[in-house]
Amino acid sequence: MAGNSFGQLFRITTFGESHGEAIGVIVDGCPAGLTVDLDYIQGELDKRKPGQSKITTQRKEADTVKILSGTFESKTTGTPIAMIIPNEDQRSKDYGHNVDIFRPSHADYTYFTKYGIRDHRGGGRSSARETAARVAAGALAKLLLKTQGIEILAHVSSVGKIDAPNVSITNAEEFIEQREQNIVRCADPATAVEMIEFIDSVRKDGDTVGGKVSCHIQNCPVGLGDPVFDKLHADLGKAMLSINAVHGFEFGSGFEGSSMRGSEHNDVFVTDADGKVSTITNFSGGIQGGISNGMPIEFKVAFKPVATIMHNQQTVDSTGKAAEISGKGRHDPCVVPRAVPIVEAMAALVLADHWLRNKNSKL
Amino acid sequence: MAGNSFGQLFRITTFGESHGEAIGVIVDGCPAGLTVDLDYIQGELDKRKPGQSKITTQRKEADTVKILSGTFESKTTGTPIAMIIPNEDQRSKDYGHNVDIFRPSHADYTYFTKYGIRDHRGGGRSSARETAARVAAGALAKLLLKTQGIEILAHVSSVGKIDAPNVSITNAEEFIEQREQNIVRCADPATAVEMIEFIDSVRKDGDTVGGKVSCHIQNCPVGLGDPVFDKLHADLGKAMLSINAVHGFEFGSGFEGSSMRGSEHNDVFVTDADGKVSTITNFSGGIQGGISNGMPIEFKVAFKPVATIMHNQQTVDSTGKAAEISGKGRHDPCVVPRAVPIVEAMAALVLADHWLRNKNSKL
Amino acid sequence: MAGNSFGQLFRITTFGESHGEAIGVIVDGCPAGLTVDLDYIQGELDKRKPGQSKITTQRKEADTVKILSGTFESKTTGTPIAMIIPNEDQRSKDYGHNVDIFRPSHADYTYFTKYGIRDHRGGGRSSARETAARVAAGALAKLLLKTQGIEILAHVSSVGKIDAPNVSITNAEEFIEQREQNIVRCADPATAVEMIEFIDSVRKDGDTVGGKVSCHIQNCPVGLGDPVFDKLHADLGKAMLSINAVHGFEFGSGFEGSSMRGSEHNDVFVTDADGKVSTITNFSGGIQGGISNGMPIEFKVAFKPVATIMHNQQTVDSTGKAAEISGKGRHDPCVVPRAVPIVEAMAALVLADHWLRNKNSKL
Amino acid sequence: MAGNSFGQLFRITTFGESHGEAIGVIVDGCPAGLTVDLDYIQGELDKRKPGQSKITTQRKEADTVKILSGTFESKTTGTPIAMIIPNEDQRSKDYGHNVDIFRPSHADYTYFTKYGIRDHRGGGRSSARETAARVAAGALAKLLLKTQGIEILAHVSSVGKIDAPNVSITNAEEFIEQREQNIVRCADPATAVEMIEFIDSVRKDGDTVGGKVSCHIQNCPVGLGDPVFDKLHADLGKAMLSINAVHGFEFGSGFEGSSMRGSEHNDVFVTDADGKVSTITNFSGGIQGGISNGMPIEFKVAFKPVATIMHNQQTVDSTGKAAEISGKGRHDPCVVPRAVPIVEAMAALVLADHWLRNKNSKL
């Protein structure tokens, strides 16, 4: 069973290796009549692309996206939308020395054992490069959601042990502007400075460090999510966990909620003057019984440190013999700044899918 | 799009409300020739059933499972296996007083808004009662996995702020025996005593508390998991998050891993005398690049406190008017002891599915 | 990969063997708020049930359907609807003599070889008995379609070489009334008499004969069908071909259309006074480019003769040795009269599914 | 719900319009380790491409396929295989005059009504041009099947009222050689001459004509097909009916079988000296109970005449007003010669999918 499709009604299928011809995606199920703003899609890709700053990998890729099908005079036609991003800087000779060696905490060993063959160039399909296709498709999903006023807003909330304070989000544009003012994509400027310094010092050590991305979804209508298995947070969780390097997902009260009591955790319902129901607290993270309740959706994603480090490491080769690996190549000291658009993209794909699915909840 | 099926090749579809005629499940895709031990399946259900002890709900259900199809002379035949569990103690009058009131942090409001109608009796489909069907199907998956030596072993590792020390697991039977010696299902006997006392005090307060379940999977072969979306941990995460009250999932180093450096987090490969590759540490939690690497799979699940408490609470009714709710009915002060077999069942469903899927990874 | 589910949004999963405890179906994805008329569902099952007349099998089954979940006060709630039909007349001793013998043109040999095990009682899962579950689910789909005025109207158009003239259908109720006035379910009374006589003579010979069912769908809106693979007629074709004994499917001009010229086959568009577009002829059978065009949908299904005959036949047993089989048991001399409700049910499932799917064709 | 994917385990997703940048396909689920013979794939495309002979459309397309991902050193790696075919001869000005007119028996009206927008250039997505992507993917499926000795062999068996006699097929290569010796792709040379003459005369009339393609599958193992819905012939039927212009599908005895008696239709089992079970006749068409029985699989596909003719025709425009259309553009007088590789491709996709699915039929 193939694992390269995601979503039911707004469904994507991606392809491409780190050092192949191109990577890309087919989006099937996008309703006809959506205006496709190619600049917006390219802008999202630019936030993910390598070589942005001193704290990201120095690989250079323009990551220029091209739409091959599914639009006519800048509108979607209801037919599948194929988007392609050529690979340009395929410096595969950098990887020649690791052909037969399993890099620690990479996917080399598992891919080789599972498939009996491995495209060793830059991690092949297991490279985070494949996430560019997700960002392109997610940007389209965002455009769809924007027609409904739904905004997906993520930022870096932790790097190593440095945690940003909670950022109160009211205006989507302001939030994005503030986040984009620093290269680590943390919406709290003071913490951002600290994070950048820390990542830079880790980079100089030839090391890497993990971090967390927090996501807030505004204006999600009540009703998205399909119990009992396709609960909204279950699909969000799967989406996030499918991103390279993610080791944890929590929403609402999350792991801390497990040490709380019901009497403090319950979100009390109130009605405002216009009859709109909301809750005073939001420990439910905007989702109750697996269905969005109209409050902001809040979740957090934990990324492990990037496995490629500039140190010598012990390992084994494909014959099982002990080997030493030296960390050449170009990689990120910390993945979270570039992970922000990926988290947003995957969240958008889940929301777009469930927004379409919810059309048929009742007669 | 319906959300009541789970899995691709080992696929289940469940049905049933808390106070309807019956709940049940169809398992489609189980290979023919598996010996079905009905006593084992019933035994798993007995671990989940209500009314087991003073720290679980007092609702009484025999939860007797019956197989309607798909087996012949105690073997699976390759046709769909339907299992049914009649509801017996449907004391729905207990719920009569809440017909039009949205209970805080329950699914009443979201179901009513999404579907325009709600079976208010005991939470209807949103009741954790539906998990009995998962446990029955999961028990079948476990039987399939046992033919391969794969064992799925969960226990309660936290209740409120009480954390059990790490339990080293070598023998599956011993672990289960030890866990089942106490009513909270914690494999560390000393912590279990503490947890039980605490839950009992919370119960006496008319309150509830959350907790965590840790899961360890032994003897999983290398190769399970289908990148880039159906990574093994992504499917495990979705499975866990689809369980009622779950607010978080992490595997391997999890959330803590996000504050580590690559140089400490990387799992170094070594080969033993028989040529078997393993890693010295297991921060990867048995999964690399979304594919099992032959090390034990380790993950943790966070449960929020049960929303039903025996206190008066403010809320609104279906017309939006303020209302007060008083907590009658019979519910669990802490859900984790009964969640252990559910976590194991869902993990088994994911593993069985990916074990079948992996048959076609190479020619 | 399991094959017991059908449909994407209006999705059914069936279970059950000829001589097991029960057969049944889960319908997942039916919108909430549909009034469920249980008498209507039972009425559809009564048209399929065995023992109706002298030209159907003498097996007696009440085929009483029971709804286990998914409705509340006679309305669907958006949760899965499980329906169950107990098996009553499980005279499996009739089949004891054929345990190890492969009946010619039955599924005994293929099931045994594929699964390595076979529930030989009455054909097990390969018995047409499983179609009762389809009829129950299809009746629910019909109720959904009736809310849109869509009517699915099938009848027996051929038995052996006896062909009914084309029946012009205007009023759905009249058509059904006329069809149900004879036991062969042909809407042309004169042909019906001839068919019944012929089937009766075939029955007396201990033989069986094939036939055709024609289906006409009224008031289908423009727009159902999802190119390029899930064209409406492709899904109808699969639905029909999945019914036991079906060997052919054609729509519109069908096989005859292959010998026509474009200039005679093209359906010319015209607009009536109200601006409604229609076509003068309907060689397209109501479907163009895989999408319904608002004209009546017309298709025809060919059924082979039932394989169970009351003659002695040569065959082999499960060890490959030559064997003779004598045709005991109770079976239909001609399957088409009982196939009419099955054809309608499967068509309804396809239409309901595509009606839901079409909600998302445009913004 | 999107309709541009086909298959479960060997799964394809296609994209592309007649006059867009490119068409293409992603194949997900092809096992790793398959040698990819790009020349073979190109050769299959060459059989489908336009401009081959005087009896096909004069549009010129090189139809050169390029693989973008999923292979490494000419072997599949288990990752998705993307193939792309650029559009070259996009003479869209030919279509400018039909922008707002609905061509009779084309998909213009249904697409416009369903999606609210239409890429009118050459039929957009509804053009048979999309089948090139199917042929590329099908060629890969054929390569997979060839590793098992399975051969899929189709030819033109009817054009208009001209029927070829049954062709006995023993050697796959000889059959293909014989078929490819004439431009109509009929394996009976004498009938081929007659067909070509007839098509040419129809072409000179500015008209079109339908035809039939017969397909024979050799060496299919016993066991492919998943009852009760994904029967092998049901999936073959859907595959064929999804091809543009197909109006009918039958297998084995087909429509004629419906007028036969059971006593003549039943296929008697025999065992040969090696213990291999076969049947004396093959009215079952190689499939019993929805599962292949090891006999050759035989089916037939009916194609309606191409809708584009060089005559003036009455129709309506997008405002509902009467309009006249004159048939410019370049089109096929008869579609079946170019349909042969498409029928084979779709059959290969079904067989490859079920061959993978069957790996899990028993423990």
Image: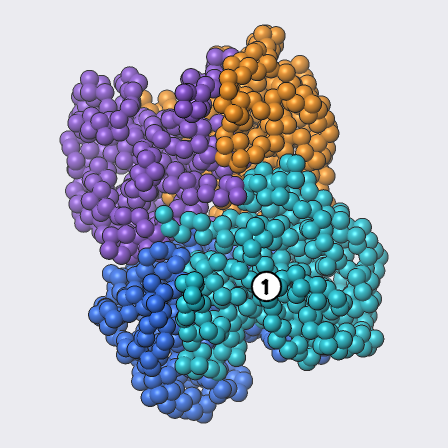
Chain colours: A purple, B orange, C cyan, D blue
Q: Quadrant of residue A44?
A: top left
- Return the residue at label 1: C240
Q: Could you tell whether D139 is left or right of B19 in the image?
A: left
* Vertical arrangement, residue A161 with respect to residue B29, above or below: above
The foreground one among C279 and C36 is: C279
Q: Quadrant of residue C229?
A: bottom left
Image position, residue C120 (x, y; %): 74, 58
Q: Quadrant of residue D173?
A: bottom left
**What's the amino acid at mark 1?**
Met
Q: Residue at x 60, y 46 (%)?
A: C27
Q: Residue at x 50, y 37 (%)?
A: A226
Image position, residue B39 (x, y; %): 72, 34
Residue A10 makes an appearance in the image: yes
* Vertical arrangement, residue C28 with respect to residue A233, above or below: below
* Vertical arrangement, residue C335 with respect to residue A157, above or below: below
The foreground one among D316 and A92 is: D316
Q: Could you tell whether B188 is left or right of A1 in the image?
A: right
Secondary structure category for the residue under label 1? helix
Could you tell me which chain the residue with mark 1 belongs to? C
Q: Could you tell whether B70 is left or right of C19 in the image?
A: left
Q: Residue at x 60, y 40 (%)?
A: C76
Residue B230 makes an appearance in the image: no
